Amino acid sequence: MPLIGLAQKEADLFVQSIVGEGNGGHRDGCLCDASFSHAARSVRISTLNRVSVTNNTAVWETDAPACLFRLCTSDNRLPIAEGAEHGDAVTIHLEFELNGRTVEADVDRHRTLLDLLRDEFRLNGPKYGCGMAQCGACTVMVSGRPARACVLRAARVSGGSVTTLEGLADPATGRLHPVQQAFVDEQGAQCGYCLNGMVMTAVAFLRRNPDPTEAEIRTALRDNLCRCGTHREIMASVARAAVLMAGRRDV
């Protein structure tokens, strides 16, 4: 059901929880620049009320909250396909790399990447959880960076690369990625619904930080929610994955 009747104070807190303070308006791990952060702070309750938590095609009805979607950085903005920002019913032709192979698709400008991946390419790795970039179940990697596919418009990946859970294993041998194997070894899942997003976030994180501390792992995964409460096993899984990826034997 839509977020009807959300008090403005609560709306402001909601936006603040995503955008954060300090560092020019950046939140650690939030892929946005200061101008987008400033725009997001102007989002009013009327905008928030138009977001549906049950419709995974719903998008914020303004261009400002691109920062809420963790889509882009000031120095590494995702490309936007021609026509993606113009018109009301534009069909956009996309070409991008998906799990190592070049693919093409014609999409409506408002269609989310999650819809495209699941419905057109039959990739069930990214899950639909909240539809608001809050739980992390839909996490994929876009040009090497974690992104929430449930709110990321498909048009924004044109010319880039997308990696889902299905693209992690060795294509020649089928051998699991070290992060996947670590989650198996440490029994990091209970129901498993959040796990795919956890794995994708962990892969991107460990590529940036191959020897993390426990505190750094905790920070990296703070926006990925596990309702079952297997956080101890998840932490152990990522720590083990770091060891496996480094080729060390102290596992």
Image: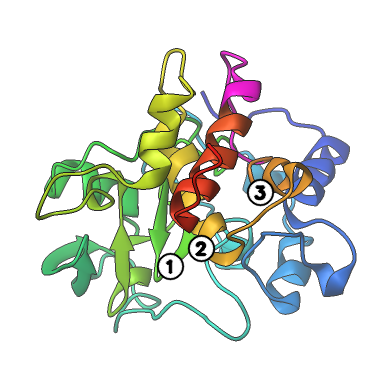
Is residue 224 rendered magenta in the image? yes
> Could you tell me which secondary element the residue under label 3 belongs to?
helix
Question: The disc labelled 3 sits on which kind of residue?
Answer: Ala
Q: Quadrant of residue 144?
A: bottom left
Which numbered disc, 3 or 1, marks the residue that appears first in the sequence?
1
Which residue occupies the foreground of this view, 117 or 93? 117
Q: Quadrant of residue 101?
A: bottom left
| Closer to us: 14 or 243 | 243
Q: Which residue is mark 1?
A: 144
Look at mark 2 in the image and give the residue it sits on: 207
Whether residue 131 sits left or right of residue 166 in the image: it is: right
Where are the magenta residues, as a range? Answer: 223-233
Separation (CA) of disc 2 from disc 1: 9 Å
User: Is disc 3 surrounded by few (<14), some (14 to 19) or many (20+) residues within 10 Å?
Assistant: some
- Label ID, residue 58: none
Q: Amino acid at mark 2?
A: Arg
Residue bearing the label numbered 3: 220
Q: Compared to 81, does 206 lie above or below?
A: above
**Which badge, 2 or 3, is on the more N-terminal residue?**
2
Q: Choose mark 2 or mark 1, whichever is in front.
A: 2
- Between the C-alphas of marks 2 and 3, the distance is 12 Å
Helix, strand or loop: magenta stretch: loop
Q: Residues within 10 Å of mark 2 (few under 14, many from 20)?
A: few
Q: Secondary structure at mark 2?
A: helix
Q: Nearer the viewer, residue 36 or 134?
A: 134
Q: Secondary structure at mark 1?
A: loop
Percent across and percent down for residue 4 are 65, 28
Q: Is residue 123 above or below residue 112?
A: above
Residue under the image location 51 percent in, 23 percent down? 1
Q: Please, is residue 139 above or below residue 90 in the view?
A: above
